Image (spheres, coloured by chain):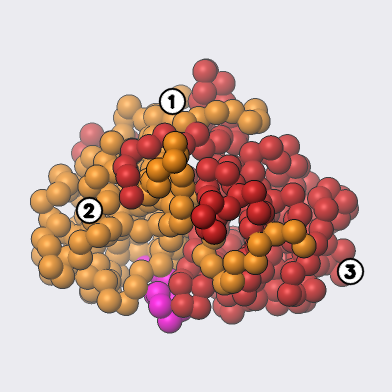
Chain colours: A orange, B red
């Protein structure tokens, strides 16, 4: 094989950069996560991997609910902040405008074009991380990100998280953007 | 709330388009999956959701192993094919060049710039899908997709899968490409 053997690495491309929301005590808290994926369609479910030490975990365990908020690229600095600073030390309740849907225990970020309200249906202890499986109870999409009644990814303009290196014009970047270039018609 | 309530939908942006490989009987088979995410770092693990009816599932269950292959955008037509046609009806063994790493039961696609060899450590029955958690045993990256010894996402040029609509220049597209545009330095 001509390829380079890299060892056991978490290489997946692309990965999203989402904000996981939970009420910790009475305060909303948000953490950035890239290790998130859809898990099933019936019922709709999503998985997200969270380190046991995370402040957000306390809220998820206490309420059995959480939110997944999909940021657009203009929110990159705030997404970065929520990935670097822990709710153990920083109060992250004021970073975004918070709203609630049908659950009062899953804070939604008003500025994010897509929000999912989730109820924990499974959690798997995978040593470094707890993998939460959340049933998606409701989804909300900004009106200006809808085309013909459906969510439009090009208007949502999501962030892509790169755990490893992305070089653009010779510089390393942590976040990149989707610039839609067609490779195939649907 | 100003947003549109969409019901319970699997909205996550971006999602990858990967090829899941397994040996079914003595033949390699590959199916396209978008519902895939990293699940843990120690040990490194990945999740992938697969419908119980899928041909690939037989191979994963029989061998306890599978591969995740990250295609680059030039492979979009083949990725599309592997998502549309089932191994129950089509022999997909000849679509790609197949190679093997340390496992003889997890076929790797030579044309894909990134390959992961995985061993099933958990499987969760989520009704419509089985969520497989695979420990990542080894990863392989094309030499020309490496910068300073590390995988470089801009060279890997991965596909983004859009389950819902993406409109580009007025037309609906199923696959889109990352065109790296910086939003934040790392």
Where does label 3 land, which residue? Answer: B26
Split into 4 quadrants, where in the image is the C terminus of chain A? Answer: top right
Camera sees residue B60:
no
| Upstream in sequence: badge 2 or badge 1 | 2
Q: Which residues are magenta?
A: A120-132
Q: In which quarter of the view is residue A103 placed?
A: bottom left
Same subunit, tags 1 and 3: no
Please report the residue visible at 73 percent of the width from the left and 75 percent of the height from the top: B102
User: Element at badge 3?
Assistant: loop
Please report the residue visible at 48 percent of the width from the left and 68 percent of the height from the top: B39
Q: Is residue B24 above or below residue B77?
A: below
Where does label 2 land, which residue? Answer: A81
User: Element at badge 2?
Assistant: helix
Task: Check residue B17 for magenta coloring.
Answer: no
User: Element at badge 1?
Assistant: strand
Percent position of residue A130, x then y: 39, 75
Q: On what subunit does the disc labeled 2 rest? A: A
Split into 4 quadrants, where in the image is the N terminus of chain A? Answer: bottom right
Q: Is residue A135 left or right of residue B154?
A: left
Whole-angstrom CA distance, mark 2 to mark 1, is 31 Å
Percent position of residue A138, x then y: 36, 50
Where does label 1 land, which residue? Answer: A147
Q: Name, please, the residue furthest toward the top.
A: B170
């Amino acid at each position: 094989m001509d390829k380079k053997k890299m060892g056991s690495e978490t290489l997946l491309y692309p990965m999203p950069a989402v904000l996981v929301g939970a009420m910790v005590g009475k305060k909303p808290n948000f953490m950035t996560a890239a290790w998130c994926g859809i898990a099933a369609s019936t019922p709709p479910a999503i998985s997200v991997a969270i380190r046991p030490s995370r402040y957000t975990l306390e809220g998820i365990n206490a309420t059995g609910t959480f939110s997944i908020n999909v940021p657009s690229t203009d929110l990159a600095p705030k997404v970065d902040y929520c990935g670097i600073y822990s709710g153990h030390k920083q109060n992250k309740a004021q970073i975004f405008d918070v709203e609630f849907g049908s659950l009062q225990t899953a804070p939604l970020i008003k500025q994010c074009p897509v929000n999912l309200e989730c109820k924990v249906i499974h959690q798997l202890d995978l040593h470094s991380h707890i993998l939460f499986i959340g049933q998606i109870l409701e989804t909300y999409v900004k009106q200006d990100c809808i085309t013909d009644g459906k969510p439009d990814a090009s208007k949502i303009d999501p962030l892509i998280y790169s755990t490893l290196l992305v070089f653009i014009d010779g510089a390393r970047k942590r976040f990149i953007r989707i610039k839609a270039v067609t490779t195939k018609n649907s």
